[in-house]
Amino acid sequence: MTPSPASESASVPESESESGPVLSVRDLSVTFADPRGGAPVTAVHGLSFDLARGEVLGLVGESGSGKSATGLAVLGLHDPRTTTVTGSVRLGGQELVGAGESVLRQVRGGRVALVFQDALTSLSPFHTVGAQLAEMYRLHHPGTGRAEARRRAVAMLDRVGIPAARAGDHPHRFSGGMRQRVMIAMALMNEPDVLIADEPTTALDARVQRQVLDLLGELQREHGTAVLLVSHDLGVVAGTTDRTLVLRGGRAVETAPTATLLAAPTAPYTRALVGAALTLDSVPGTPLPTVDDPSPAPRAPRRPAPRATPGRWLIEVEDLAVHFPGRRRFPGARAEPVRAVEGVGLRIAPGETLGLVGESGSGKSTTSRVLAGLQAATAGTVRYDGVDATRPDRALRRRIGKEVQLVFQDPYASLNPRRTVARTLDTPLRLHTGLTAAQRRRRSAELLEQVGLSAAHLDRYPHEFSGGQRQRIGIARALAPEPRLIIADEPVSALDVSVQAQVLNLLMELRERLGVAFLFVSHDLAVVRHFCDRVAVMHRGRLVESTDRDRLFTAPHTDYARGLLAAAH
């Protein structure tokens, strides 16, 4: 998004501006009550900023800095029973803090719209995307007929690059990038004054991320919408925002035009945050500096990649295919299967790290689910440690369940919110070891210490941890049965840049110390380059390239791989 003329008014005092800011936040504070009766926690402390018409303001900071709490407070989405919001949020001349629910309902989706990180959980799984857009329009335009609302919904879907025929599809039939396009279409249905985009591209690969951001910028300029972009990705902020506001601990650290802030940050914290965003360019395999420890990474030589001797591959996949039932377009028609994976072959040696990359919908996660025993193959062969595991019996399934573990993308959704950390870690130990309850408790404490936490965290619940800490708990759970292979499916994409460095350092340390092999599924090519020995590239369900990491990044063989690398820069 290029700076628009409207953004220049951001520096003009309201009294001197012709119309004033479209959104004005003054002395905003957000405090959460402790459900166990402890001291309340203030997530946002006296925050003030203005957002001009047509301006794009980036709101950045680490996990727990108050970014999302600020965005939710603007629309009064915090639970008033557990959250206290004070200060002022004025939309034009209308005060939103303390406004009644009937007022806020008119504002939400009408004058202020939201785009969240996870489009799938934000869309109703029971209704078609066309119906959801039409409903959004009718809510804010009483008296509009169903036919007119549907016509407008189809037109908006077409505007974001989704064919009219897909209006009758449900959200689960779309890729991640397409679902995010649907969310953007829904947010702009009523031409809002303000759009709050909370990590809108975090879960998308570089190519789709660029497409979505370009689309969002085009529509933002077309409608003159002001955008509050909440993000931990400084690369996204650099390419899309006019100004940037840096938060730490719920307080404003620094605000400036984005180009100025990234080129010459004045606050020590901002300098460390910008520096952490550049650390993946260091020597692959070496520890990454973090915001808390910004010292340069040691220039240690990269360890040689493990090589399996004949017959000693840990995982061998040959001609793998996974098909899902297709949808009949009309009664009696033949339903063509969805070929999610077709003819894939790959190998992983003991102790090796294989990166699996590709765009949304390329078949990465489906392939990894087959290797974990969570998805049946339609055709092909999967061998685990020399044994055919394509159709495993109970004993082999139990062995794979112990020796192959997963670390998921979302560290909160993958943990049971009703279970303490102790119960979460106890489950795999009880299933796969013969330890007594007391021994399992001690082992759980040891696992937490391995991932940089402590025994004091055992009796806490997931909501009491930051995103990075929750991901450490997920890693500890994966380590509990002493696996030989960890399948890490986008394990750092939901984390801010400094926490990414902490988690990657932890994974590299565990790999070196424990000799665990990794299948590292990711859309972040910089992370893959730093962490992996070899890289396999998937496109539309097929493996198009598999080679040594350095060879891929210096001399890719296929046009598709070259396109991915270009989109990441």
Image (spheres, rainbow, N blue to C red):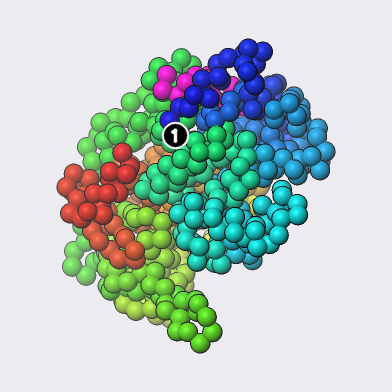
Q: Is residue 351 left or right of residue 63?
A: left
Depth check, front residue: 20 or 101: 20
Please determine whether, in this image, residue 14 is positioned above or below residue 390.
above
Q: In this view, does 414 lie to the left or right of 417?
A: left
Question: What is the three-letter code of the residue carrying label 1?
Answer: Met
Residue drawn where x is 50% and y is 66% of the image? 165
Q: Position of residue 511 (x, y in %)?
A: 35, 49
Q: Position of residue 50 (x, y in %)?
A: 62, 23
Instruction: Residue under label 1, please give it.
Output: 1
Q: Position of residue 498 (x, y in %)?
A: 45, 33
Check if residue 246 falls in the magenta segment.
Answer: yes
Q: Main secondary structure of the magenta part?
A: strand
Q: Please identify the residue farthest to the bottom as the structure is shown.
A: 332
In terms of image quadrants, where is residue 100? top right
Q: Determine if residue 280 is in view.
A: yes
Depth check, front residue: 486 or 446: 486
Q: Quadrant of the C terminus?
A: top left
Residue drawn where x is 39% and y is 69% of the image? 340
Residue drawn where x is 32% and y is 44% of the image? 567
Q: In which quarter of the image is the N terminus?
A: top left
In terms of image quadrants, where is residue 380? bottom left
Please determine whether, in this image, residue 463 is positioned above or below residue 299.
below
Depth check, front residue: 288 or 336: 336
Please determine whether, in this image, residue 186 is positioned above or below residue 390.
above
Query: What's the magenta region?
Result: 245-260
Which element carries disc 1, helix, strand or loop? loop
Please determine whether, in this image, residue 67 is positioned above or below residue 365.
above
Depth check, front residue: 74 or 297: 74
Q: Bin the neighbour count of mark 1 within 10 Å (Cα to Cα): few under 14, some 14-19, many 20 and up.
A: many
Residue drawn where x is 41% and y is 33% of the image? 239
Q: Determine if residue 477 is in view.
A: no
